[in-house]
Amino acid sequence: MSPASRLPPETRRKIRLGVNIDHVATLRNARGGFAPDPLRAAQAALKAGADGITAHLREDRRHINDEDMRRLKHSIDAPLNFEMAATEQMLDIALRIMPHACCLVPEKRTERTTEGGLDVVGGEKYLIPFVNELLRAKIRVSLFIEPSFEALAAAKAIRAPVVELHTGAWCHALEIGETEKAGAEFSKLRAAAAEAARLGLECHAGHGLDFKTARTIAALPELVELNIGHFLIGEAIFIGLDASVRQMIEAIAEGAGA
């Protein structure tokens, strides 16, 4: 029995898990055709206990495409988190699809994956209209940001109700064995989570998380949601998506109950 499962139910802190299914579409697109189907992956993740589904519709459609987003919206009975760049095209699509949530992220054509947080400090005036339009449509808005007080203050000024802290630098430092840097990066995440709560912002986190790092960061009391994709899809090759998601839920519960 895990430490979390030994806690009385009323004392357990629930952190939501959003499963990002982008790389199921990456695998499909490598060959073309319709398999594997991201919608089927989303349904399997939800059946395994995930709380929601995340998908990033990129400008170049390298993985998720417009039809995927439409099918996800109309076929899953759970919150859909639409990751998107702050562009007029993506705003129009979001307002047509009407997902539960939109997470505004930076996007570069040449990057393999999202390389950092959104420039909310330099782009504050530019971002405000996007946030306002989405909020008027009753879509929850989050900003994917670096764990810094400056970024949090800008997010508050932009009036986004949710921030998602970029955990990539911390996870990468751990992966390559830079222990001192990893400790410094985690200190930034811990301080940023506390500052987000002080500012009245709902705090999420994601990018590069695995079972171990998800368990560690889930101990931060301010965290409400983790969004995890690449690792879960990778693990699914070896143990199946159901087991991958269930093990992640258990890891998060253990961290939250620590």
Image (tube, rainbow, N blue to C red):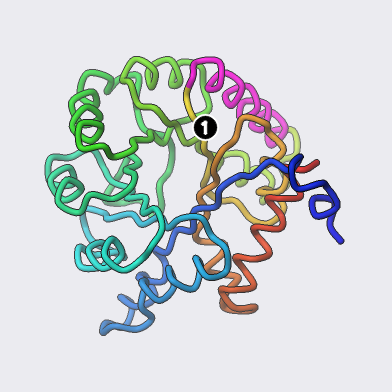
Instruction: State how many labels appear.
Output: 1
**Which residue: 52% across, 68% down?**
233
Residue 14 position in % (x across, y down)? 64, 44
Q: In this view, does 98 lie above or below 53?
A: above
Q: Is residue 165 above or below residue 250?
A: above
Q: Quadrant of residue 65?
A: bottom left
Along the line of sight, the residue nearer the viewer: 88 or 113? 88
Q: In this view, does 26 lie above or below 231?
A: below
Residue to which mark 1 is pinned: 203
Q: Is the magenta stretch mostly helix, strand or loop?
A: helix
User: In the image, what residue type sits under mark 1?
Assistant: Cys
Along the line of sight, the residue nearer the viewer: 189 or 227? 227
Along the line of sight, the residue nearer the viewer: 151 or 250? 250
Residue 42 position in % (x across, y down)? 43, 68
Q: Quadrant of residue 232?
A: bottom right
Residue 218 position in % (x across, y down)? 67, 42
Q: Is 57 left, or right, of 251 in this rendering?
A: left
- Quadrant showing the C terminus: top right
**Which residue: 36% across, 72% down?**
39
**Which residue: 55% across, 46% down?**
226
Q: Quadrant of residue 245?
A: bottom right
User: Mark 1 falls on what kind of element?
Assistant: strand
**Which residue: 33% across, 35% down?**
141
Q: Does the magenta stretch include residue 164?
A: no
Looking at this view, name the residue that lies furthest to the front: 10
Residue 55 position in % (x across, y down)? 36, 57
Chain part drawn in magenta:
181-200
Q: Does the magenta stretch include residue 194?
A: yes
- Quadrant showing the N terminus: bottom right
Q: Residues within 10 Å of mark 1 (few under 14, many from 20)?
A: many
